[in-house]
Amino acid sequence: MTTLRAGSATDVGRVRRINQDRALESASLFAVADGMGGHVGGEVAAQTAIDGLRAAWEAAGPDPHRAEALVGAVQDANRAVWGRALADQDLRGMGTTLTAVALVDQGEGDELALANVGDSRAYLLSAGQLTQLTADHSLVAEAVRSGELSAEEALSHPKRHILTRVLGLEPEVDVDAWRMAPVAGDRILLCSDGLFNEVEEADLAGVLAGISDPAEAAATLVALARDHGGSDNITVVVVDVVDVSGAKGAPAAGATASSGEAAPDGSAGADPAGSAQGEPAESAQGEP
Ligand code: MN
């Protein structure tokens, strides 16, 4: 059984009056939600999403779950927020980001499943290198990906807070999903934008590489974001892969090489279950 160890921290920051971020830490499921909308809407949206995610995960049965259960739980969380907003005039239009990681088993040993909607992020620290795993669903991030904006222009763009995908606005939502092989010593960072808008990636990597206790690392990152201005709520969950077992015939070197290469709807290259799923859906035969 793969062993994970996690710690989290959240803070209202130095400007906002209410913390509309929420974090989730449980045995096999971890998440960050950053709510938005109305007087209490953001808080309610984030809490409803976290509660809905956890309830759906637990209802999916005893661990280990398959990766599809995580995407299903995010869909359930979306419907919970959407339903709540429909039912209460004061909450109309509320929404939230949701970034979640879970320990799953596709039948070939343990894997980590990752799901994302919105502009909270997951990063992987592996062998001292920090890699962003998720792609932000925001106007500026999409403009950067299409080459219309530089990464530097995006940092100060007036529309940088506008999201293109969020939980709770529609009965269905597209969920980005990834799978990767757990590697002992790897560390996953889940965080709201209140962290990465204040703290540069090199500093995130430095703290994550330098502080071994996950709760202490999370608290240090939150304090750093406050020191750098704290203009938004800040939420951090740090998940450590302590011990890995159950990966049938996966050599450690192969697993290490593949761990940084998570891609949307794909999975780590060395993982046998993942490569079977990664087959192209269409054959070479085309219409004449
Ligand atoms: Mn935020």
Image (cartoon, grey):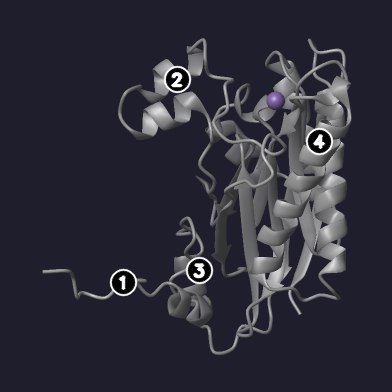
Residue at disc 1, secondary structure = loop
- Residue occupying image coordinates x 69% and y 39%: 167
User: Which numbered disc flags the more N-terminal residue, 3 or 1?
Assistant: 3
Is residue 248 visible from the viewing direction of this image? yes
Report the front residue among 97 and 225.
97
- Between disc 2 and disc 4, the foreground one is 4
Residue type at mark 2?
A: Ala
Q: Residue furthest left?
A: 288
Is residue 8 visible from the viewing direction of this image? no
Q: Is ligand 1 within 8 Å of the beta carbon of the residue shown at mark 4? A: no
Residue at disc 2, secondary structure = helix
- Residue occupying image coordinates x 53% and y 35%: 137
Residue 9, above or below 28 = above
Residue ID for mark 2: 154
Residue ID for mark 1: 282
Numbered tag placed on residue 256 in the rendering: 3
How far, Cα to Cα, is label 4 from label 1?
38 Å
